[in-house]
Image: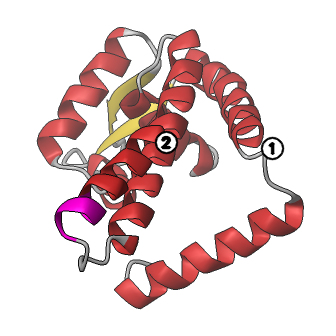
């Protein structure tokens, strides 16, 4: 954070008329994002997963039994490219966490499904993930978290992102 203050002071010296308040806010959001992402990535690594791998198994897990989706359904929910999806699925399949299967009734349809090992792991990692998030936000009161959540939701709504 000292770096952000130094940057603000440098701009104030060089261009005193420049309003850096937006730069300051965005910079603080970026620092916070990096800190939180790092902590969550560490949680995933404890289970042998990457952020990307966790994203796939969490999406399959929250889809409900039988914990399977088509690759296109996964793409819709995860907002990534098909090339990225193929790479993620191949990696998770090698680890025995997902399997690809052809539909019994329509051979053109393929499913990505959590294996028993993937289901077991997803349940373990999601609880740790939520615990990590709780720890990260423990510096805020419940009321502060609710207020911040609402303020950020409003920003997203105004951008048309929610």
Q: Residue 27, relative to residue 160: is it above or below?
A: above
Disc assigned to residue 1: 2
**Residue extending farthest bottom:** 158
The question of residue 78 being in magenta is answered with no
Q: Residue furthest front?
A: 13
**Percent x, y for residue 127?**
75, 32
Please determine whether, in this image, residue 146 is positioned above or below residue 32.
below
Q: Residue at x 31, y 50 (%)?
A: 7
Circle 1: element type:
loop
Residue 67 appears anywhere in the view:
no
Residue 54, label in figure: none
Marks 2 and 1 sit apart, C-alpha to C-alpha, by: 19 Å
Front-most of residues 16 and 125: 16
**Picture quadrant where residue 144 is located:** bottom right
- Taking the spot 62% from the left edge, 20% from the top edge, the residue there is 121
Disc 1 marks which residue? 138
Q: Secondary structure at mark 2?
A: loop
Question: Does residue 74 appear to the left or right of 87 in the view shown?
Answer: right
């Amino acid at each position: 954070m000292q770096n952000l203050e130094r940057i603000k002071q440098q701009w104030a010296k060089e261009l005193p008329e420049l309003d850096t308040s937006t730069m300051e806010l965005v910079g603080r959001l970026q620092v916070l994002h990096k800190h939180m992402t790092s902590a969550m990535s560490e949680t995933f690594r404890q289970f042998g997963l990457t952020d990307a791998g966790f994203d796939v198994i969490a999406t399959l897990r929250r889809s409900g039994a039988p914990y399977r989706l088509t690759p296109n359904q996964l793409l819709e929910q995860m907002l990534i490219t098909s090339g990225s999806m193929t790479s993620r699925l191949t990696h998770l399949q090698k680890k025995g966490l997902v399997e690809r299967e052809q539909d019994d009734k329509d051979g053109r349809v393929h499913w990505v499904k959590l294996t028993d090992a993937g289901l077991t792991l997803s349940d373990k990692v999601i609880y740790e993930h939520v615990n990590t998030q709780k720890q990260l936000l423990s510096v805020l009161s419940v009321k502060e978290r609710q207020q911040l959540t609402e303020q950020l939701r409003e920003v997203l709504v105004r951008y048309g992102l929610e």
